[in-house]
Image: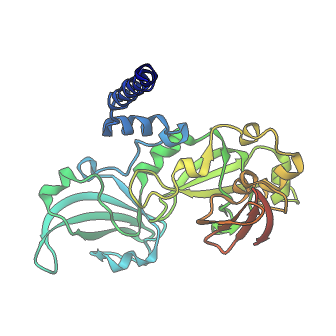
Amino acid sequence: MRKGRIVPIATALLLALSTAGCFTGVESTPRISLNDVRKQQAANITDEQRFLAGLAPTSPSQWRPGHRLRVDDAKIGLVMTSASGPTDSLPGRDLVFESFAPAVSLTGTDAVEITFHADLPDGRAKYYYRAPVDVASLDTLEALNVPFTVDMDLVQRVDSIMRGRKFYVRTPLWYDVDNERRAVASLRHVPVVVDSVVAGDANYPLGVVFTLVEPEHARLLEPSGASCTRMVYMTVGRSKAATRNFDTLFSFRNPRETYPSIKNDVWEMIVRSQVKEGMSRDECRLAKGAPAAIQRIPTYGGIRENWQYSDGVYLIFDDGYLTRFRL
């Protein structure tokens, strides 16, 4: 009887030792630090995200006499004081920086008065803008925002980098530069060459003007054969206002090569931002972009996904394929 009890006891000891070894192994696993997480995030940054990442409007400490701000809205008269000229003549013209001077705001706090001039048809006029900061803080500010204006130094720097380069445009939100920048029908994932970068508006300071590379794409938009020059609005920087940076608008590589399994007729629909039943989730994402919200619902047959877009588009997938949609 005693011999019969030895085996279970030995087995228990071996299990205890092996279990202890397992715990030791888990406890010795290195912890993931915050630096490790940051390194991993940095490793996942795309080439498109790195491109232009270091650009931002010129800090006020770097403003020199002659620094230019392009006025984009007639509302400039709400914030700009005229010394010798009308403010309604300013939209589309440049305010030329002259100097900073200490001042006091209407509420009695320290402020900075910025003096500009503008060249109007009737001659040079002078204007003042009072910024709600003190003179001492100008050296520490990353940027100084003058409402309804665009920093032309930033525009020129981006123009020098992007002009003449070929990219693949991701967004279908294009504007016709020859027709008062009106929104027009457009394409996705097609090659373009940048003609220039011009002043955008106060929300999207850069206007990237480009020409379609492929004649068949140009004919889709201009069947008459007329010139097909278009523009997209762009932001730069890392602020919350930078919602349309380069990586959301353009790619360096041909996206068609990334998805060789997509049939040609489906790809033609993707280029036009169109969808049809039977398209996969990847194909629909290429055609319509990322949805604002996704709802997953278990069904008897599998999983149903409802994709909702901010413009009212609604896509329904069953087991990964589009079965219904509302455009």
Q: Kindly indicate the quadrant of the structure image that contains residue 323.
A: bottom right
Q: Residue furthest front?
A: 1
- The quarter of the rendered structure image containing the N terminus is top left
Residue 326, position in %: x, y?
Answer: 76, 73
Q: Residue furthest top?
A: 3
Q: Residue at x 45, y 57 (%)?
A: 242
In this view, the residue in front, 309 or 179, is 309
Residue 14, position in %: x, y?
Answer: 41, 22
In this view, the residue in front, 262 or 32, is 32
Q: Kindly indicate the quadrant of the structure image that contains residue 131.
A: bottom left
In this view, the residue in front, 180 or 325, is 325
Q: How many marks?
A: 0
**Is residue 309 in view from this perspective?**
yes
Colour scheme of the picture: rainbow
Residue 296, position in %: x, y?
Answer: 64, 64
Q: Residue at x 86, y 49 (%)?
A: 216
In the picture, measured across the screen, residue 143 lies left or right of residue 234, that is: left
In the picture, measured across the screen, residue 175 lies left or right of residue 128, that is: right
In the picture, measured across the screen, residue 176 lies left or right of residue 68, that is: right
Residue 137, position in %: x, y?
Answer: 16, 56
**Is residue 176 in view from this perspective?**
no
- The quarter of the rendered structure image containing the C terminus is bottom right
Q: Residue at x 35, y 36 (%)?
A: 32
